[in-house]
Image (cartoon, rainbow, N blue to C red):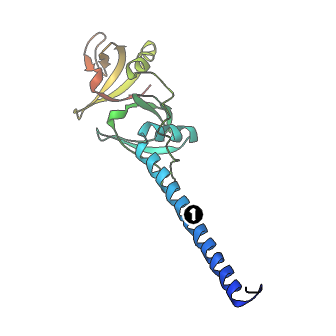
Amino acid sequence: MDEPGDASTDELLARLGRWRGEQEAAEAARSRTRERWLRQQAAEAARLSSVALDLAERGAVVTLTTTTGSTHAATVVGVAREFVVLRSSGGRLTFVRWSCVAAIRLPAGERAGEADADRDAPLDVRLAHALAGLVADRPRVRVLTVGCADAWTGELRSVGRDVITLRLDGAAPGGDAVYLALDAVAEVTVLG
C-alpha cells in the first residue's frame, strides 16, 4: 500500500480533482442550456399584448406601425384583449386594434422585458365599448379602416353593435354621415 504523499496517491487525487472540475463544468453548461431553453420557450409563447403591457408599465415611448401604414410615436397607456391605447406627446389618444398592429419598436438601445405568455391584458373591454364611452362628449375623431387608404374624420355620433356613425367634417348639421363597419375599424384617434 502506498503511503500518503507518494506518486500514486497524488495521481489519484489529481484525477479526482480533474473529474470533479469536469463535472462542475458540465453541470454549468447544462444549467446555461436549460436557462437558454426556458428563455426560448418564453419567447416562443410570448404575445404582443404581453410585450405592450410591459411597455405600458414602464411608460416606454414606442413607435407603433399599423397594417394601414400609419406610424405612431407614443406611449402605451392601455392594453386590452382587442386593442392597444396610445397617447401621443400632444396628449391625443389612439385606439389600435391588435389585428392591425404590424410592429412595435423601441428607441435605439432600449429593450423590452421578457414577455410573460401567461399574462392577460388587464382591460377586459371590447373596442366598441371603449368607443361608446366617448360618444357622450361628441369628440372629433379620425378613423382608419382596413383596406381603405382614406381616413374618415368627423364627430363621433354613435357606436352600435357593429357600426360607428360619424358626422363628417364640413357637413351641414344633420347631414353627411358615414356609417363604418366596426369590424373594419383599424384605428381611432381622438382629435378633440
- Badge 1 marks a residue whose secondary structure is helix
Q: Is residue 41 above or below residue 185?
A: below
Near-viewer residue (41 or 22): 22
Residue at the right extreme of this rendering: 4
Assign the C terminus to one quadrant of the image. Answer: top left
Q: Is residue 12 above or below residue 152?
A: below
Is residue 179 found left or right of 189 in the rendered image? left
User: Whole-percent x and y of residue 134?
Assistant: 44, 18
Near-viewer residue (25 or 32): 25
- Measuring 37% from the left and 18% from the top, which residue is drawn there? 156
- Quick check: can you spot residue 13? yes
Characterize the local packing of mark 1: few (<14), some (14-19) or many (20 or more) Cα atoms within 10 angstroms.
Answer: few
Assign the N terminus to one quadrant of the image. Answer: bottom right
User: Whole-percent x and y of residue 173?
Assistant: 31, 11
- Measuring 46% from the left and 46% from the top, which residue is drawn there? 42
Near-viewer residue (51 or 88): 51
Is residue 5 found left or right of 114 in the rendered image? right
Determine which quarter of the picture holds residue 135: top left
- Quick check: can you spot residue 90? no
Residue at the front extreme of this rendering: 1
Q: Mark 1 sits on what residue?
A: 27
Q: Amino acid at mark 1?
A: Glu
